[in-house]
Image (cartoon, rainbow, N blue to C red):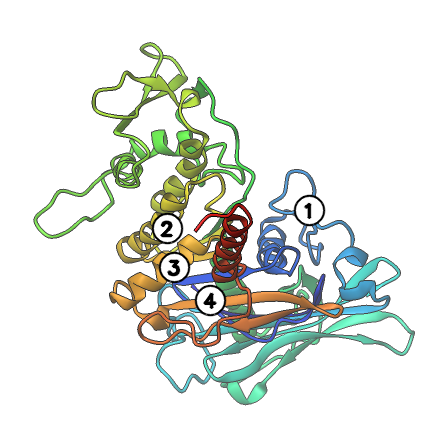
């Protein structure tokens, strides 16, 4: 689970400050205020981890990536050249790690429950290089890392940095190393201390696992189709545009029911729980995914809007069903404990369904221990969430909400101060417009028109 993030000099952000994540983290704010950039940064880290190029410091993406960011010049704040991109990220391993994972290191606590990684990348003439990175464990800072230096021949090199006070019986000191992306390094043959090597491998492996267990759904989702193709493969997610949502539903049929709905009740399959929420939100009465004929790979999705209505194709009902379906499948299909990143999950949805999304998120958090990070423009979603906090459906400290704005030449981030009853103590002015002022102006206009027409 992601615990915190800080970014400096990325796109419109000079400094985000420390962003604390909860079970549900929401970014709200004006257009072009930097909300999406925070999610894009996480996606950049994810696609870098998943890249097959070990020497690529940061993967800025292409048409097939989670996000396409252009060049290093494009992502550095105010296009500074040279520029420095600094960031730190902290996460909680799904299972606390003990001495067996970190042999030879002094750990005050018997378990490692919190790990952080900080890095600095320098850009110069549209090129970039790794300046340094380091890891911290629990409250021990800068345990192990790397630093770029210039040798006497004016050639750059990277030195391993180790806090020797934290190690027992350190034999060999690994000096010159080769960076691997922005968070690890390869060891020179013949000059390896196994304690150091094991620690680096475990820390970088934990970081990779954290990002591998994060899943993304973008705001622009595929149009519904009359036929979907599935040949029996096991997809890991629903795709960036939700294009594999039906494939994920079909793949889930190969697993035992996983959705626990309460004591003495049978577990639901992913498909059953998705159907439950589509009905609960008032969008459909029932839906079915079935092959067009036996032993065929083409499937159709059939919907009944009401109990009395005829079955129709997914393409023949409102657009909202096809846009919400990938959100629901993602939440209940990915492994328990995953981090889910959503951009505008409310897009194309009726206000009542937007509000209902808050209930869906709370359900997924409670049943599957997922972490949800989203950016949204939905006042209805936020208000339902506030209501559920007042009703104690979710502890307030598990929810982190932020307001983004653009002031001067940089984005700003304001943590919203939630009280135990879901009230926002520091509500920004005109957060969602000024509905009271609009209603008052409408009433004044009506009175003036009636007076002008001689009405009483």
Q: Mark 1 or mark 4, which has the lower sequence index? A: 1
Q: Quadrant location of the N terminus? A: bottom left
Circle 4 — which element?
Answer: strand
Of residue 439 and residue 171, the one placed in the foreground of this image is 439
Looking at the image, is 176 positioned above or below residue 343? below
Q: From the image, state whether disc 4 or disc 2 is nearer to you.
A: 2
3 and 2 marks in contact (CB < 8 Å) = yes
The furthest residue to the top: 293
Marker disc for residue 383: 3
Q: Which of marks 3 and 2 is nearer the N terminus?
A: 2
Mark number displayed over residue 401: 4
Looking at the image, is mark 1 or mark 2 earlier in the sequence?
1
Q: Which mark is residue 355?
A: 2
Q: Earlier in the sequence, mark 3 or mark 1?
A: 1
Residue 179: name its quadrant: bottom right
* Front: mark 3 or 1: 3
Lower position in the chain sequence, tag 4 or tag 2: 2
């Amino acid at each position: 689970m992601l615990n915190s993030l800080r970014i400096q000099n990325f796109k419109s952000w000079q400094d985000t400050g420390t962003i604390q994540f909860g079970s549900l983290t929401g970014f709200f704010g004006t257009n072009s205020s930097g909300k999406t950039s925070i999610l894009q940064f996480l996606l950049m880290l994810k696609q870098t981890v998943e890249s097959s190029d070990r020497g690529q410091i940061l993967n800025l993406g292409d048409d097939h990536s989670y996000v396409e960011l252009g060049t290093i010049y494009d992502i550095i704040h105010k296009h500074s050249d040279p520029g420095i991109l600094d960031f730190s990220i902290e996460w909680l391993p799904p299972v606390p790690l003990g001495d067996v994972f970190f042999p030879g290191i002094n750990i005050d606590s018997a378990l490692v429950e919190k790990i952080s990684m900080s890095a600095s990348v320098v850009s110069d003439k549209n090129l970039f290089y790794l300046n340094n990175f380091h890891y911290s464990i629990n409250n021990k800072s800068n345990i192990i890392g790397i630093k770029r230096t210039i040798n006497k021949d004016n050639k750059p090199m990277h030195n391993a940095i180790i806090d020797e006070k934290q190690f027992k019986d350190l034999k060999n000191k690994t000096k010159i190393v080769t960076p691997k992306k922005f968070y690890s390094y390869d060891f020179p043959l013949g000059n390896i201390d196994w304690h150091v090597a094991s620690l680096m491998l475990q820390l970088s492996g934990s970081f990779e696992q954290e990002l591998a267990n994060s899943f993304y759904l973008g705001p622009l989702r595929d149009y519904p189709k009359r036929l979907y193709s599935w040949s029996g493969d096991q997809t890991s997610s629903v795709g960036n545009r939700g294009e594999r949502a039906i494939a994920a539903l079909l793949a889930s049929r190969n697993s035992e029911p996983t959705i626990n709905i309460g004591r003495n009740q049978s577990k639901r399959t992913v498909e059953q729980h998705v159907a439950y929420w589509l009905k609960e939100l008032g969008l459909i009465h029932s839906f079915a995914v079935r092959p067009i004929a036996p032993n065929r790979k083409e499937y159709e999705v059939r919907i009944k809007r009401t109990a009395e209505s005829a079955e129709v194709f997914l393409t023949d009902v409102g657009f909202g069903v096809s846009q919400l379906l990938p959100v629901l499948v993602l939440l209940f299909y990915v492994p328990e404990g995953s981090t889910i990143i959503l951009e505008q999950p409310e897009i194309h949805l009726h206000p009542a369904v937007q509000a209902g999304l808050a209930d869906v998120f709370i359900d997924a958090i409670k049943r599957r221990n997922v972490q949800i990070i989203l950016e949204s423009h939905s006042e209805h979603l936020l208000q339902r969430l506030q209501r559920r906090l007042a009703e104690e459906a979710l502890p307030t400290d598990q929810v982190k909400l932020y307001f983004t704005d653009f002031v001067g030449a940089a984005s700003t981030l304001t943590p919203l101060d939630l009280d135990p009853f879901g009230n926002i103590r520091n509500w920004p002015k005109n957060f969602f417009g000024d509905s009271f002022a609009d209603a008052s102006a409408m009433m004044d206009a009506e009175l003036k028109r009636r007076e002008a027409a001689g009405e009483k």
